[in-house]
Amino acid sequence: MLPPVLQNLRIPVVGSPMFIVSGPELVIAQCKAGIVGSFPALNAREAAGDPPLLDQWLTRITEELDRHNQANPDQPAAPFAVNQIVHKSNTRLDRDIEICHRHKVPVWITSLGARPEVNAAAHDCGGIALHDIIDNRFARKAIEKGADGLIAVAAGAGGHAGRQSPFALLQEIRDWFDGPLLLSGAIATGRAVLAAQVAGADLAYIGSPFIATTEANAQPEYKQMICDSGAMDIVTSSLFTGVSGNYLAPSIRNAGMDPDALDSADAETMNFASTGASAKPKAWSQIWGAGQGIGAIRNVQPVRAYIDALAAEYLAARASVAALPDGGWRTN
């Protein structure tokens, strides 16, 4: 059974945290529309000497969702989540953990490393911890270190994606784990959300379609490129961050590079943006990430409009499956 914080959503969907793109406007809109909204803590960047922006963001999100719930008791907002990058390159981690603990963040998402103390902090303030993984080995380690649930990042996901088929990844995890399990990878329609559940996931984890929303913190050209592109326009490369990720080929061309002839990078050089004298284009700000499911996205629209359509598709898919003819299939 899902923990209470993940129950009673409008549809079984969590909006995935996207570097730069996810901010308070997007998260608040997602939660008000009935799905879990999330953002990476590292997106809240302040100038040196200024008060922590993460503190301000969490105050704003909490207060706006509280006001919404008071005004709409019959349609309360979904909870929100904060993503912590648990990697040695994140020098803010301890500070951000303290801020999230103080604000009693309900859902913690950890990436690029499993740390027991982060899970303990989430539990201590009444939250749950979900860890994203790309294979069964990392899944086992995450649960052993205290995570409550898993986010299976399969092939086709945007940003730092896995390489395995969702069917292979989910079946290996479900062989031993019956806790909360989310699936990420090319999910953009209500039919795909239902398919994720049928394959063994509890909820779908959706990111790229939200880039093409009015509330997303993305350049207009980025949003339009999502609408104009499809699965054939997605390129997988480790060049830009040191970790394999999926990116939009047109953005690579715009940066003066050939998406069909990219070098690889050592994972030890992992970073979220090129610095110093490097001539390499910056991931996320110049080289734009996206998943293979973007072929379903045709126009930039408000978050509410996209989630309304997603919910309608999901309910229609459930009804169509229930109405399938028997077909005379043998069961013995």
Image: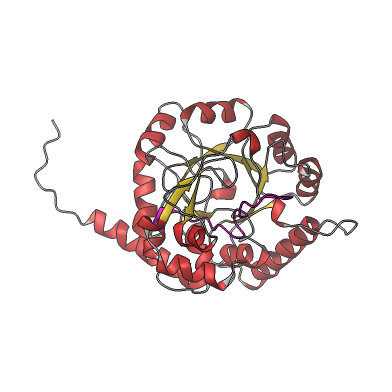
Magenta-drawn stretch, dominant element (helix, strand or loop): loop
Q: How far from the left and from the top, in percent, is residue 162?
A: 47, 40
In this picture, residue 138 sits left or right of residue 313: right
Extreme residue in the right direction: 49
Asked if one can make out residue 210 in the rendered structure from this viewpoint, the answer is yes
Residue 317, picture quadrant: bottom left
User: In this figure, what is the number of numbered marks?
Assistant: 0
Q: How far from the left and from the top, in percent, is residue 230?
A: 37, 61
Q: How far from the left and from the top, in percent, is residue 274?
A: 67, 50
Residue occupying image coordinates x 78% and y 42%: 91
Q: Is 297 colored magenta in this rendering? A: no
Residue occupying image coordinates x 77% and y 56%: 54
Q: Give the magenta-colored segment's residue range.
A: 274-293
Q: Is 288 colored magenta in this rendering? A: yes
Q: How far from the left and from the top, in percent, is residue 298?
A: 40, 71
Q: Is residue 190 above or below residue 185?
A: below
Q: Is residue 175 above or below residue 106?
A: above
In this picture, residue 264 sits left or right of residue 95: left
Between 230 and 111, the one lying in front of the other is 230
The type of colouring in the image is secondary structure
Asked if one can make out residue 303 in the rendered structure from this viewpoint, the answer is no
Between 6 and 135, the one lying in front of the other is 135
Residue occupying image coordinates x 75% and y 65%: 60
